[in-house]
Image (tube, rainbow, N blue to C red):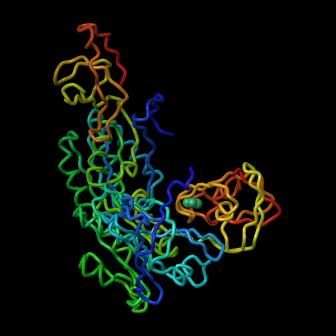
Amino acid sequence: MSMSHNKIPVTVAEVVTLNPLIKRFRFVRRDGASLPAFSGGAHVVVEMDDHGTRRMNPYSLMSAPSDTTGYEISVRRDDVGRGGSLYLHQHVKVGDDLVISAPVNLFGLDLQAKKHLMLAGGIGITPFIAQMALLSAMAGRFELHYAARNPGLAAYADDLRARYGDRVQLYYDDQDQKIALAPLLAGQPLGTHLYVCGPKGMIDWVRRTATDMGWPQQCVHYEEFLAPPTGKPFQVELAASQKTITVGPDQSLLEAIEAAGVDAPYLCRGGACGQCETDVVSCDGHIQHHDHWLSDEEKATGHKIMPCVSRFEGRSLVLDR
Amino acid sequence: MPKTVFEPSIKSRPTYGVLEHRPGTAHLMVADAEGAQALLDLAHSAPPTLWTQAMIVYIPGRSGQQFTQALANLSPSQLHISPSYAAAQPRLHKILQTAHAGLQIYLAGTESLMGQAQAAAMAVGVPHRAVQMEHRGSLARRVQCVHCKGITENVTTDPFECSHCGLNLFVRDHYSRRIAAFQGVNIDAEDPGQVPPAVERFT
Ligand code: FES
C-alpha cells in the first residue's frame, strides 16, 4: 500500500508550552478545509525536514474526535532520542507548514466493552484524552488511572480532573504513589476492557498482571510507540528496486528506504502494526529485531524484518523491496 | 485431540477445542450430559486449586445420574444441577452479571448448550473467543426456522419439520452466534410436498 495519497498539508495554528518537557501543537489544513474525522486512539505521522534528514514520527491525536477544524498533538521532548521531538520543540512555530498523514487508529476502543479501564503513564495520556471525549459524549462507562513523575509534568491532569471528576485518578512517582494494579483489576466487572499507553516497563507490567489474573487477551489493548533505535550505519540491497542504500546511525531502515525514493508501506512506524513487514532475500550477518510484531520464532529464522525499527549488523542484507 | 470430529465446513460453523486450565480469579463451568467428562478430564491436568474457585452448572440430560457424583467429588466451590438449560439460565445470568473480570469460562457438551451459554457471556461483554468450548455427546442441533424465526431444539434429522410453523426445513451449516442456532430453510418451497426422506444426520 502506498502511503503518499494519504498526506495532508497543514499549517501550525498554535503552539502551547505545557511544562518544561511537553508542548502542544495544533494543526489546521493549509487550504482551510476540514480534516478527516477520526476515532479516539488514532495517531498521525508528522513529517519533518530536520536539516536535511526526513523524520516521520507518529503522535496520538488528543483533540476531540468531533472537532474536524484542527488536530492537536502533545510532544514530549526527548533529549537523547534521534531528534524528531527536539526538532518540533526547537524549530516548529506558529505559521509553519508541515505535512501529516491521515489518521490511523491502532488503539481503538472496543465498543463491545461494558466498561473501559484506562491506564496512562506520562505522555501516554494523549490517546485517552480523545477517547474520553468520545466516551463521555456517548455516556460510556470509563475510568482513567494516570501516573506521572510529578504534578508539574502531569499534563492535562487538572483539566481532566475538572472535566471527569472521580473517574480520573492521579498517581505521582515523587510522592511514592503507585497504581495498585492487582486490586484494581480484581474489582472490575466482567466485560471490562483494559487499555494501557505509556513506557515499555508499564505496558509489560500491566499486560503480565492482567494475563496472570485471567484477563482474555482480546480485552487488553496497549500502544507503545517505539522510537527507532539508533545504531551503527549499515548497507542494504533492495532487490526489487535494484538499489543499494546506506542507513545512517540515527536514521531508521524505513527512512533510508524512503529517502532512496522507494515507496514502502507503514502505519505506526513504531514496530507494532505489522504493516511494514518485509521479506529478507538473504542475510549474512545479524538482524537486530526491535519490533513487537514478529514472533520469537520468526525473529529467529531471520526471514522477515520490520524496517521501521529494526537494524542490521554484518556483511550483507538483501530485502525484497 | 478433540473427542468429536466434525466434517470440514463453512466458516460460520463453530469449531471446538479441548478445555485447558487457564489462570483466572474465578472459573465458571457449564456442561450438559457427556460434557461432564470433559470437566473430569480437565481435572487430570488442572491444579486442585482450580476447583476451590470453580462454579459448575450441570444439566445431566440424557446422561442421568451417571456423572453427578464424579463432579461432586471434584469439590467445586459450587455445583448446581439443573433439569434444563432454561432452568439454569437465571442462575447463569446472575453469575455472569455479578462476576468480575478475570473469570474464566469453560463450556462442555452439546452445541446447543455451549452456544447459548456463550451468547449469554457475550451479552455481558465477554469476547466470544475468550470462552473455551469442548464438544461432547450428542450432535443434535438447535435450529432456527428462517421463515417463522421459531427455534427447534434437538434436531437430529435433515430435513425436519419446524416445531413452530410446520414447514419442512433443510438444516444448513450457517450458524448465528448471537442466537446460538443453525439456520433451517424451507426445502419444498418450489414444489410443495416434494420432500426428500429425513436422514439421521445429527446423532
Ligand atoms: S510500520 Fe508498523 S510495524 Fe513497522
For the point 20% across and 30% down, which residue is it? B149
Q: Is residue A210 left or right of residue A311?
A: left
When asked about the image quadrant of residue A263, the answer is bottom right
Q: How many marks?
A: 0
For the point 45% across and 29% down, which residue is it? B9
Residue A131 on image: x %, y % = 34, 66
For ligand 1, the image quadrant comes to: bottom right
Task: Check the image and report above or below for A317 versus B202.
Answer: below
For the point 44% across and 74% down, which residue is it? A12
Nearer to us in this view, A214 or A80: A80
For the point 32% across and 19% down, which residue is it? B158
Q: Is residue B17 left or right of residue A237?
A: left
Task: Check the image and report above or below for A283 versus B147.
Answer: below
User: Does the rendering let one see residue A279?
Assistant: yes
User: Does the rendering let one see residue B203?
Assistant: no
When asked about the image quadrant of residue B188, the answer is top left
Residue B168 on image: x %, y % = 24, 17
When asked about the image quadrant of residue A14, the answer is bottom left
Task: Check the image and report above or below for A199 versus A189.
Answer: below
Residue A302 on image: x %, y % = 71, 56
Nearer to us in this view, A49 or A140: A49
Residue, far front: A31
Q: Is residue A41 left or right of residue A295?
A: left
